[in-house]
Structures are given as C-alpha cells and as structure tokens.
Amino acid sequence: MTPTLVRNQPGADASAPADAGTRARDWAEIQERMLAPLYEAVYDRMEVGAATRMLSLGCGSGLAMLVAAARGAHVTGVDSDRERLALARARLLPDAGWDGAPAHSPHPARRRARLLEDGGPAPVGADGAPYNLITVFEPIGCAAGDSEGLVPALRSAVPLAVRGATVVLTGWGPPERCATAAVLQVAARLADTARPPRTEPGRWRPTLRDDLEDVAARTGLKPDGSGRVSCPFGYADVGSAVRGLLSTGLFDAAVRATDRSQVEKEVAEALHPYQREDGTVWMPNVFRYLVCVT
C-alpha cells in the first residue's frame, strides 16, 4: 500500500490565513496523496497502460494523472480550480506554455499529459483519438450537492469517449468505516450555528449507500462493478491534519457560518482521539469506486 503519512510541513501554522494559493498547496502537499491507494487500485483493475487515453475530471493538482502517465497512459486533466491546475502544470508540464503543449520536457510521462481549464475537454492526441477511460477521483457523497456539477460534466465528457468506454466514479465509504467521518461532523455542527441554519451546497452530510449509482443513473451510465479501497489519512501532527482537511473544501460552510479560527480549533479537538503517542495522526478510511460503461 502506498504510504500516506505526510511529513511535517515547514512553518505549518493551523491558524494561518488560507488564500487560494495556500489552500491549493495544502491540498497538493498534504491531502492529495491520501487517495493514492485509490488511484493505484483503480488503475490495476482497469489495466491502465500505453493503450489508455484517460480524461480526468476534477484533476486537481495532478497526482492521479502523474501516476497514470507513469504507467504509459495518455492523460488529459480538466479542473475549474486555477490554483490546483497551476500546480498540476508544474508537476506534469514544467516546460510548457499555458496552452499545455509540452515544449522540450524529457520526461516521458510529461510528454503524454495535457491540462485544460474547466469547460473544454478535448481529444488527447492531434489525431483526434477519443478517450477510453474517464475518471472522477474527487470523492462524492460527503457534502450536500457535491454531485450537481459532476452530472453535467460527465454528460459533456461521455460523447468524447469511444462507445463502451469505462467511467470510474469515486466516493466516501460507509461512515462507520471512515474515522474521518467523526471529524467531518464538526463541519455540519458548526454550519448549523448560522441563523438561520445554512443548507447550502457543500455542507457535510453522511454518505448514502447509492450516491455513486445515483450519479450513474442520472448520467445514463451502466454500472459494471465496484470496489472498496483502504485509504488511511496519516499526518505528522495535528496542525498538518487541520490544514489538510480544510483544503478539501468540506469545512467551507462551517467557516462561513462561524470563522476559520473557530473551525480550526474544533477540528483540532476532534482529532485528539486519532493522535498517537508520537504526535502523529492516523485515521483509517474506506473509499468506494463504481465502474461504469458508456
């Protein structure tokens, strides 16, 4: 299993202001790697390799793309978060221009990568070859309305894929199998302190059994198998854990209802049961993926 215990971040301060750039870096440096076992399990099952032309919806800062490209896949990533996308470019296309055309990068994985801003998925190659794998590695099923943007994105992407292409959706596992669910309940409780209580999209809610199947049905996809993967969240200390968790966006409604300092304080308190004697934080979690065909 890919190690997920992250090193202490230099100068980490859980009370530091989180501008867009800081938040994106927290995601890339602390939190994103927690899902590495999920990426590997999906790629093993899909036999990702040189014949794979993959479209990654919500590619974030590009770790899943980098793993697929290292296996020989041709990858295109799309994301609406410009800060995360900029970090993905630095990882995958360090010598490229803004259009994503690799200039003279010697790294084979980088020569097979392409990154686009949300709203314009395109064929991977100049020959117009369609995708045969579409992945959504941003887990759904843990926040109200977190699938609403995904459904239209999938409807736009599916026509770019070959007939019978594979689509992989991912989500949080059952709350009783996810230690992080207990910490995420802080987000819902704090969001409820607003008057009137907020029910806006992004507010935490318990994962439902058929979250992924519901997205597949609304998108016209046919389920063709599923799996569960252990993805423990491991952090060097409580401060790094707070920064990593807040970078997910799952606490945004709570921050708007109260303030960031209050959320950071209460998340840190909720993490104490998962802090070990050496100061590290370890939370076992299970994530689920659904394999579909177009």
Image (cartoon, helix red, strand yellow):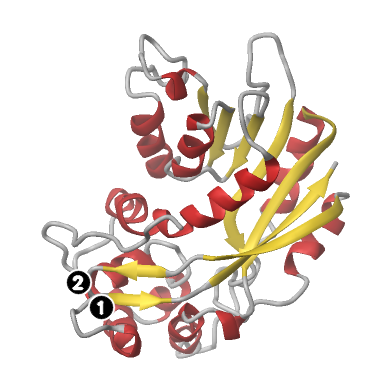
Q: Dot 2, how many residues are within 10 Å of its Cα: few (below 14), some (14-19), or many (20+)?
A: some
| Residue 9 x, y percent position in the rendering | 18, 58
Pick the residue in front: 133 or 145.
133
* Vertical position of residue 186 compared to residue 173: above or below: below
Q: Dot 1, how many residues are within 10 Å of its Cα: few (below 14), some (14-19), or many (20+)?
A: some
| Horizontal relation, residue 279 to residue 172: left or right | left
Q: Distance between the residues labelled 2 and 1?
A: 6 Å
Assess whether mark 1 and mark 2 are in contact (beta carbons under 8 angstroms). Answer: yes
Question: Quarter-wise, where is residue 232 in the image?
Answer: bottom left
Q: Mark 1 points at which residue?
A: 261
Q: Residue 30 carries which label?
A: none
- Residue type indicated by callout 2: Ser
SS of the residue under disc 2: loop
Q: Name the residue under label 2.
A: 15
SS of the residue under disc 1: helix
- Residue type indicated by callout 1: Ser
> Is residue 1 among what the camera can see?
yes
Q: Residue at x 62, y 45 (%)?
A: 44
| Residue 281 x, y percent position in the rendering | 30, 76
Q: Quadrant of the C terminus?
A: top right
Badge count:
2
Q: Which residue is drawn at 41% across and 74% down?
A: 256
Q: Which residue is drawn at 51% across and 73% down?
A: 285
Question: Quarter-wise, where is residue 258 in the image?
Answer: bottom left
| Horizontal relation, residue 1 to residue 54: left or right | left
| Residue 187 x, y percent position in the rendering | 45, 81
* Vertical position of residue 228 compared to residue 91: above or below: below
